[in-house]
Image: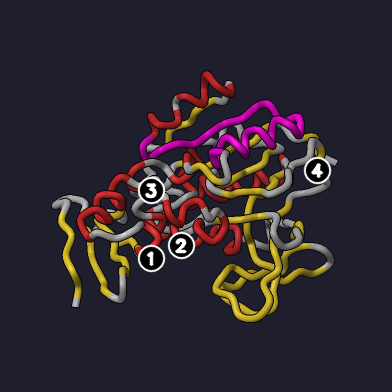
């Protein structure tokens, strides 16, 4: 058994698919069923006896500053959040990663998934029946054997992970060796793990349905928290609805439009069988054919 040293909560990304809410505030600061996502995670970690907490920020980093005083967490800034994938957040936190939970700040756990002592390195997983586009795992002797993007009737990567100190040292050594390789820039840390899966044994920790949630879009959040159907908390959407003379519940199928730097530059949506596009830079709403 490993006694958990700390937790690193990754909150650097733009979460552009969560437009327009993520344009106005980091996704991790979204309130879900009365509790801010990252605050709920911090509370659950603390309840498990894990007090040494680090938050890796990037996009709109200053909005997270209040957490230092409110919860005593420590901040690590990732200046490459627009230039590299999430492995850059791991790299910035490498000095503190030992027997550590690595968490995504935008996950919602209906029950506390954290423990003070952990048997071995693992990736949290939920079961998907039928076809899925998620990252699907197979296992052999209790260890992840392979991972494919997309599959059927499979355990899928979703939620937090635990790295024991041996796993951490091996992964960080690999990351150091490949960090300056141009091919690494766009890789998720999970892709790097898959590339070296035989060197990095990790178990699947299986969770029942309705424990781990991730909301990629506003429509998905609305399915979980019905209060967002009539009140999106979005200044932009409220202005759009006033202009169109519609209720917020009539704006659906919101999809972000990305620019060259991968940040959201606008979004499209459907309203009363019509399709629209909103441009952030021009603050312009146009109807699409």
Where is mark 3, residue-wise?
22
Residue pictured at 57% horizontal, 39% vertical: 35
Between the C-alphas of marks 2 and 4, the distance is 35 Å
Q: Tell me where the magenta segment starts and ends, as one range.
A: 35-60
Query: Mark 3 near mark 4, Cβ–Cβ under 8 Å?
Result: no
Instruction: Give yes or no for residue 46 being in the magenta stretch.
Output: yes
Q: Secondary structure at mark 2?
A: helix
Residue 248 is left or right of residue 5, and the answer is left
Residue pictured at 74% horizontal, 60% vertical: 204
Between the C-alphas of marks 3 and 1, the distance is 16 Å
Q: Earlier in the sequence, mark 3 or mark 4?
A: 3
Between the C-alphas of marks 3 and 4, the distance is 33 Å
Residue 100 seen in the current view: yes
Where is mark 1, residue-wise?
252
Between the C-alphas of marks 4 and 1, the distance is 42 Å
Please rate how many residues cluster around mark 2, counting C-alpha atoms within 10 Å: few if below 14, some from 14 to 19, many from 20.
some
Please rate how many residues cluster around mark 1, counting C-alpha atoms within 10 Å: few if below 14, some from 14 to 19, many from 20.
some
Q: Earlier in the sequence, mark 4 or mark 1?
A: 4
Between the C-alphas of marks 1 and 2, the distance is 7 Å
Where is mark 2, residue-wise?
219
Q: Secondary structure at mark 1?
A: strand
């Amino acid at each position: 058994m490993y006694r958990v040293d700390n937790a690193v909560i990754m909150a650097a990304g733009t979460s552009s698919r969560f437009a327009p809410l993520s344009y106005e505030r980091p996704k991790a600061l979204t309130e879900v069923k009365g509790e801010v996502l990252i605050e709920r995670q911090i509370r659950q970690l603390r309840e498990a006896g894990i007090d040494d907490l680090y938050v890796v920020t990037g996009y709109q980093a200053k909005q997270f500053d209040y957490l230092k005083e409110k919860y005593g967490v420590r901040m690590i800034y990732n200046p490459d959040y627009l230039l590299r994938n999430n492995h850059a957040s791991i790299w910035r936190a490498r000095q503190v990663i030992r027997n550590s939970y690595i968490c995504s700040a935008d996950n919602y756990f209906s029950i506390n998934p954290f423990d003070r002592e952990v048997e071995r390195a693992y990736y949290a997983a939920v079961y998907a029946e039928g076809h899925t586009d998620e990252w699907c795992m197979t296992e052999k002797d209790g260890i992840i054997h392979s991972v494919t993007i997309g599959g059927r009737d499979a355990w899928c990567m979703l939620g937090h992970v635990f790295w024991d100190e041996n796993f951490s040292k091996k992964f960080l050594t690999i990351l150091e060796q490949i960090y300056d390789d141009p091919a690494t820039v766009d890789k998720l840390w999970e892709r790097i793990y898959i590339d070296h899966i035989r060197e990095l044994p990790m178990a699947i920790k299986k969770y029942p349905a309705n424990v781990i949630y991730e909301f990629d879009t506003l429509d998905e959040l609305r399915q979980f928290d019905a209060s967002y159907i009539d009140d999106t908390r979005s200044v932009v959407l409220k202005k759009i609805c006033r202009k169109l003379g519609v209720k917020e519940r009539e704006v659906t199928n919101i999809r972000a439009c990305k620019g060259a730097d991968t940040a959201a530059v606008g979004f499209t949506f459907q309203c009363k069988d019509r399709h629209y596009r909103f441009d952030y830079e021009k603050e312009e709403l146009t109807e699409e054919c």
